[in-house]
Image (cartoon, helix red, strand yellow):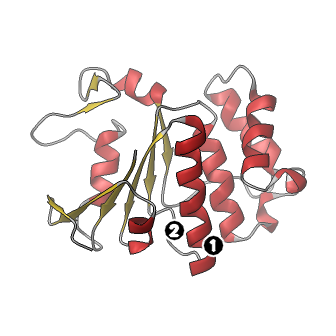
């Protein structure tokens, strides 16, 4: 499914994403991600998920293709060039693959960060504010791409955001307020 975790700033969305990616240990409770228990199977969780952080963290002087090759090599992706081509084409960046990322718009950078998160062929893609700092048109485009990734590749997409645009594409939306989840009536 495409799952929306909606809430205002400070509600705990980023903390929740960090816990679900096994980057931060929960202070209490338990959770499982792709059938693996947090705190016990953290390495396996990290191998089976993709993370789209709020800040893309790309190398401006490298091209889109070089960024993907670098991150793919770092994570041991066997078929980097095939995976890179697949996602650069899907995200409309194939014709710009040789250009330095420093020349890309915020929307293009966000699309490249999505491609990077998908290189490992994750079962779950966790996105932290994927439409933050994007204009409304590009924000809708990114949400539509996340929906298409779910439909085409069967990836579960979890979107943590304060932007209600996710409500039009998510299968389910829960609201997080002060660390508590409620059904969203939006």
Please determine whether, in this image, residue 101 is positioned above or below residue 31.
below
| Number of numbered discs on residues | 2
**Image quadrant for the C terminus?**
bottom left
Q: Identify the residue shown where x is 67% and y is 24%.
A: 77
Image side of residue 130 versus residue 28, left or right: right
Q: Is residue 49 left or right of residue 183?
A: right
- The reply to whether discs 2 and 1 touch (Cβ–Cβ < 8 Å) is yes
Residue at position x 54%, y 53% from top?
146
Which of the pair 25/173 is nearer the observer? 173
Mark 1: few, some, or many residues within 10 Å (few <14, many ≥20)?
A: some
Q: Position of residue 92 (x, y in %)?
A: 78, 56
Q: Which residue is mark 2?
A: 131
Spot occupied by residue 173 in the image (x, y as percentages of width and height)? 30, 59
Q: Is residue 163 left or right of residue 95?
A: left
Residue beneath disc 1: 138
Q: Quadrant of the N terminus?
A: top left
137 in relation to 113, above or below = below
The dot on residue 154 is none
Displayed quadrant of residue 139? bottom right
Give 151 or 51, whichever is nearer the viewer.
Answer: 151
| Residue 13 position within the rendered picture, expressed as x and y whole percent measured from the top left | 29, 59
Q: Do we see residue 138 in this rendering?
A: yes
Q: Secondary structure at mark 2?
A: loop
Q: Residue at x 38, y 27 (%)?
A: 45
Q: Is residue 9 left or right of residue 119?
A: left
> In the rendered image of this protein, does residue 68 appear above or below residue 46?
below
Give the SS element for disc 1.
helix
């Amino acid at each position: 499914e495409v799952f929306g975790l909606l809430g205002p700033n400070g509600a705990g969305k980023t903390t929740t994403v960090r816990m679900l990616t096994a980057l931060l240990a929960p202070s209490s409770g338990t959770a499982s991600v792709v059938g693996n228990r947090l705190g016990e199977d953290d390495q396996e969780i990290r191998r089976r998920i993709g993370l789209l952080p709020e800040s893309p963290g790309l190398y401006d002087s490298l091209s889109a293709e070089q960024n993907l090759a670098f991150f793919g090599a770092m994570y041991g992706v066997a078929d980097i060039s095939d995976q890179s081509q697949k996602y650069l084409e899907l995200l409309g960046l194939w014709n710009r693959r040789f250009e330095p990322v420093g020349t890309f718009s915020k929307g293009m950078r966000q699309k490249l960060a999505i491609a990077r998160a998908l290189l490992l062929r994750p079962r779950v893609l966790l996105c932290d504010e994927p439409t933050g700092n994007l204009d409304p048109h590009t924000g809708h485009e990114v949400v539509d791409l996340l929906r298409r990734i779910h439909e085409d590749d069967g990836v579960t997409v979890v979107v943590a955001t304060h932007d209600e645009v996710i409500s039009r594409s998510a299968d389910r939306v829960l609201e997080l307020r002060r660390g508590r989840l409620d059904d969203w009536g939006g």
